[in-house]
Image (cartoon, grey):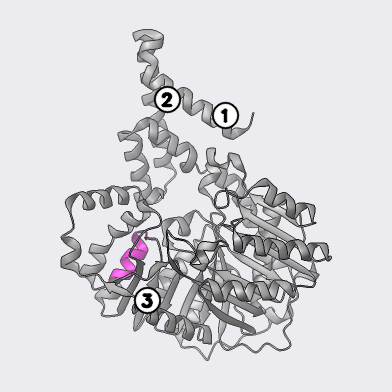
Amino acid sequence: MRRGLQSIIIIGAFIAFYYFGFGIFGSTAGTIISIFSTLTVISISLAIFMENRNPSTTMSWILLLALIPVLGLVFYFLFGQNVFKRRKYDKKAQRDLMAYERIENDALRTHQDWSVFDPSRQKLLLLSKTLARTPISFASETRILTNGEETFGTLLLELRQAKHHIHMEYYIFRADHIGTRIQQILIAKARAGVSVRFMYDAVGSFQLSRAFLKEMVDAGVQVASYGNSTSFFSSRVNYRNHRKIVVIDGDVGFMGGLNVGDEYLSRSKTYGFWRDTHMLVRGEAVRTMQIIFLQDWMHTTGEKILEQDYLTPQLHFMTGDGAVQIIASGPDNERRALKNIFFSMITSAEKSVWIASPYFIPDEDILTAIRVAAISGLDVRLLFPAKPDKWIPFLASHSYFPALLEAGVKIYEYEKGFIHSKLLIVDGEIATIGTANMDMRSFHLNFEVNALLLQTESVTRIVADFERDLLSTTQIVHETFMNKRMVVRILESAARLMSPLL
């Protein structure tokens, strides 16, 4: 019997015993079951306490178990256990580290002169390189792709030119118009002899039909799913592959905020205009993207394909206009690379901190860093959607706004449609772009991939796009925001209570 089904049966039996024990088994048996249930909740709470998790997360779990024991246990079995993470992802972390250390590439091992950057920027680069364990590249070209039309137009063009291989992984991939167009190109390339590997997350892409995938497999596309249908009923559902990576022939890469679906082309009546940011990468940094994909592929399928044919980008025409680093982060990274890099960027800012994120649920460290930056007189801005796509994170995000507004943070609600861009810009010259939101799930649970950009032309484009986005916003006024109805404030506080679990 599969582990997911076993969990359902155990939880179902526990609920039945908890609520119906007295009626079915009599008062004595019911009392025993009630005592057993209480001891179970206490023992799990003690186990959570002894794991030394983040204090807010620990208190949230214990409070949930105390107030709603049955529902709390269900949530814990599905989302709270760290056993699977420790057993599975510790091994992945070691394999990934060995891959970075083992693969030879002289261009990435030569001495790099960082003297063109001021000491604070050099310190950030050193920290980022140490935490992420990926190289800083000065021989890469990046180009910002604003919104779906530019992103998918460029992606389709590059896919059609593939000659050796196509590697693709997405959190969400839909079998709609744009998804089918990409699928047909992958099928045509596979039939033409190009090696095509396609990986999707079982939770994010749960609507993908077997027929859609079978058509790809029958054509020679290698398909892999991170997780499976039973992931919804196991602790694995909490650890999602949120990455969006495409690597073509080892020379061209795509990454950023856009999944594959018609809504990302603003064709959804629900969301309307979809504002997002993606990026094209050429040259040296593509190699890091390739290794991240290949390690994810090995973790999912067991197939080892770290071959030199996949690890040699064309460098002869690359000069680069700044520093580029590709950063992978996830539950296998105990150093919390992205969270700590974000923290360092914010605390080292001298003029401004600009943030765009559709979900804003920071932990205490990030929240304090943002507030201190604003109190210190820096220009701190948060760009956030005016309308939600998910209600609980939306409400939880709003619960953090009063403290930010009191510190002097300027918060802007994007009203033109839905903004999905995930950006952090510091002093107008350093930025991150990628899949990570400014929330606890991205910091601690999801597999994410971001790019750190320092003094590149892409940063200039990101700044210009951010400033243009502000033209379609309304700034939140502290007094007006605090005058909202009491029921809304209660819902926001309740959602915030769950924020460490989201």
CA separation in Å, label 1 and label 2: 14 Å
Picture coordinates of residue 311, whole percent (x, y): 74, 71
Query: In the drawing, what numbered circle is on residue 15?
Result: 2
Give above or below for 329 relative to 33.
below
As drawn, the residue found furthest toward the bottom would be 116
Amino acid type, residue under disc 1 in the picture: Gln
Question: Which residues are drawn in magenta?
Answer: 362-371
**Towards the viewer: 160 or 200:** 160
Amino acid type, residue under disc 3 in the picture: Trp
Q: Is residue 337 magenta?
A: no
CA separation in Å, label 3 and label 1: 47 Å
Counting residues from the start of the chain, the first of labels 1 and 2 encountered is 1
Q: Is residue 367 magenta?
A: yes
According to the picture, the residue beneath numbered tag 1 turns out to be 6
Disc 2 residue crowd, few under 14, some 14–19, many 20+, Cα 10 Å = some
**Dominant secondary structure, magenta:** helix
Give above or below for 261 relative to 321.
above
Query: In the drawing, what numbered circle is on residue 354?
Result: 3
Counting residues from the start of the chain, the first of labels 3 and 1 encountered is 1
Residue 271 visible somewhere in the drawing: yes
